Image (spheres, rainbow, N blue to C red):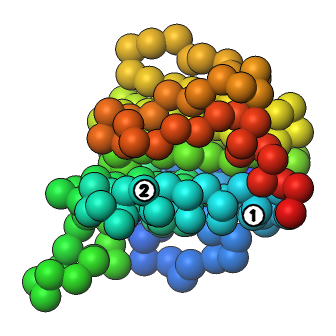
Amino acid sequence: MVATPVKNLTLESFLDLPETKPASEYIDGKIVQKPMPQGKHSVIQTKLIIFINSLLLESKIAIALSELRCTFGERSIVPDVVVLKNENIPKDDDGEVSNIVTIVPDWVIEILSPDQSTTKVIKNILHCLDNGTEVGWLIDPAEKMILVYQPDRQAQVVDILEAELIVPEFARSIKLTVGEIFNWLKV
C-alpha cells in the first residue's frame, strides 16, 4: 500500500476523484492505493466468494462481493471480500442494488498480498468492527494462517489446518476450515 498525503483532502473530495486500478482507499485524510492482487490472493478471493454465495445467496441470507467500496466512519475502503446481510444491501429507488455503499459490511475479509502492510489492513478491519462489523478475517497465504477478529475480543490466530473458522451468527451454515481455504491454492 502506498499512502499519498494530500493537504486538506476531504472524504467528499476523494469520492469525486476517478477510480484507480488497483483501488485506492481514503484513510485518515490520505489516499492509500491497494497493491495489485496476485495469484494466491485472487484464487482465495474467488473461491471464497463462490463458497459463501453458494450457501448464503441462494438462501437469501446474505451476499458476498469482491472489492466493494464501502464508505462509512470518515473512511472509504475497498475490502477484498464484503458480506452484506440481505436486509442491509443498499438499494436504489428501483429496488436494485445501489452503486454507492455507505454502510459498514456485516462481515469483512481481507487477504494479505505480498508487500502489503499487515498493520494497515488490520486497522481497516478494526475500523469495520468499531462501526458494527460482526466478524473480520485476515487471511495470510504466506503463513497459512487466518486471524479472526470480533468486537470486544482479542484476535484469534487460527493456524491449525483442521480448525473450523468463526463466522458471523447469520452465516452459521458455513463450515470452513483453514486447511480447506489453503487447499484451494492447489488448483
Report how far apart the C-alphas of labels 1 and 2 lie in the structure: 20 Å
Q: Quadrant of the C terminus?
A: bottom right
**In this image, 131 relative to 34: left or right?**
left
Q: Which dot marks residue 108?
A: none
Mark 2 or mark 1, which is nearer the start of the sequence?
1
Q: Where does residue 58 sit, x and y in percent of width and height?
A: 35, 66
Marks 2 and 1: in contact by CB < 8 Å?
no
Q: Is residue 141 above or below residue 160?
A: below
Name the residue located 42 percent from the left edge and 77 percent from the top edge: 16
Task: Give the residue type at disc 2.
Answer: Leu
Q: As rendered, which of 79 and 170 lies closer to the eye?
A: 170
Q: Nearer the viewer, residue 108 or 18?
A: 108
Secondary structure at badge 1 equals helix
- Residue 10 visible within the image: no
Q: Nearer the viewer, residue 153 or 167?
A: 167
Taking the spot 36% from the left edge, 64% from the top edge, the residue there is 57
Residue drawn at (76%, 62%) of the image: 43
Kindly identify which residue carries mark 2.
55
Decide: few, some or many residues near mark 2? Use Cα within 10 Å; few <14, some 14-19, many ≥20.
Answer: some
Figure quadrant of residue 118: top right
**Dot 1 corresponds to which residue?**
42
